[in-house]
Amino acid sequence: MSFSEMSEPLETLTDELQQYFRICEDVHAIVRRENQCLKSAEPQSIHHFQQSRKDLLQRLTSTQMRLSVHKTAWLRLPHATRAKRPEVANLIRQTLDLIMKTIVLDRENEQLLLRHQMVPVNRLPSVNRQNPHFVARLYNNNRAS
């Protein structure tokens, strides 16, 4: 398949990646607002953020499913063809960076929830989850691919 024949699917991939990035930005905005709420002088309940998260989860899941189809097609392309579309790699890198920022901020929010005793006992994170280098290793592994 020539590059010109792949142009439309690549445009679709780029559109899907941009949509996914926008959803990730929305998730990051919610996590940032939660963080601001938890850092305030008198943190209030953050349950109102949960519905926003649930709404975004559905959009995120459907976009991820569409992206997985495009990923397979993208990886089948010769490296030279993929190299002609650096915007795809840039979108992936930007999205991964934003996801990692969101994960770090969400972890901070979890710690603040624990500190303010706003987590039910049955929802406490496991001891194994307190691996400080896990996120960094995961990030580095994904950046390398």
Image: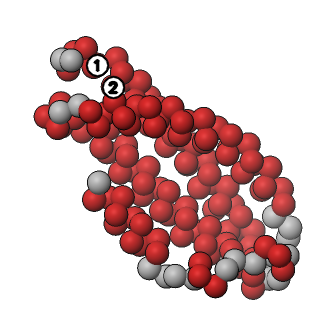
Instruction: Please state if 33 lies on the left or on the right of 103 as rendered.
Output: right
Give the alpha-carbon distance from disc 1 to disc 2, as whole Å.
5 Å
Vertically, is 16 above or below 94?
Answer: above
Q: Is residue 39 visible to us here?
A: no
* The quarter of the displayed image where residue 79 is located: top left
Vertically, is 18 above or below 26?
Answer: above
Secondary structure state at the residue bearing disc 1: helix
Say which quadrant the C terminus sits in: bottom left
The local crowd at label 1, few if under 14, some if 14 to 19, many if 20 or more residues have their Cα within 10 Å, is few
Q: CB under 8 Å between callouts 1 and 2?
A: yes
* The quarter of the displayed image where residue 33 is located: bottom right
The local crowd at label 2, few if under 14, some if 14 to 19, many if 20 or more residues have their Cα within 10 Å, is some
Q: Is residue 33 visible to us here?
A: yes
Secondary structure state at the residue bearing disc 2: helix
Say which quadrant the N terminus sits in: top left
Residue 10 numbered tag: 2
Q: Front-most of 55 and 29?
A: 55
- Residue drawn 83% across the image and 76% down it: 122
Instruction: Name the kind of residue labelled 1 in the image.
Output: Ser
Instruction: Name the kind of residue labelled 2 in the image.
Output: Leu
Q: Residue furthest top?
A: 5
Vertically, is 11 above or below 46?
Answer: above
- In percent of width and height, residue 123 lies at 79, 73
Vertically, is 117 above or below 96?
Answer: below
Instruction: Please state if 35 lies on the left or on the right of 139 as rendered.
Output: right
Residue 7 numbered tag: 1
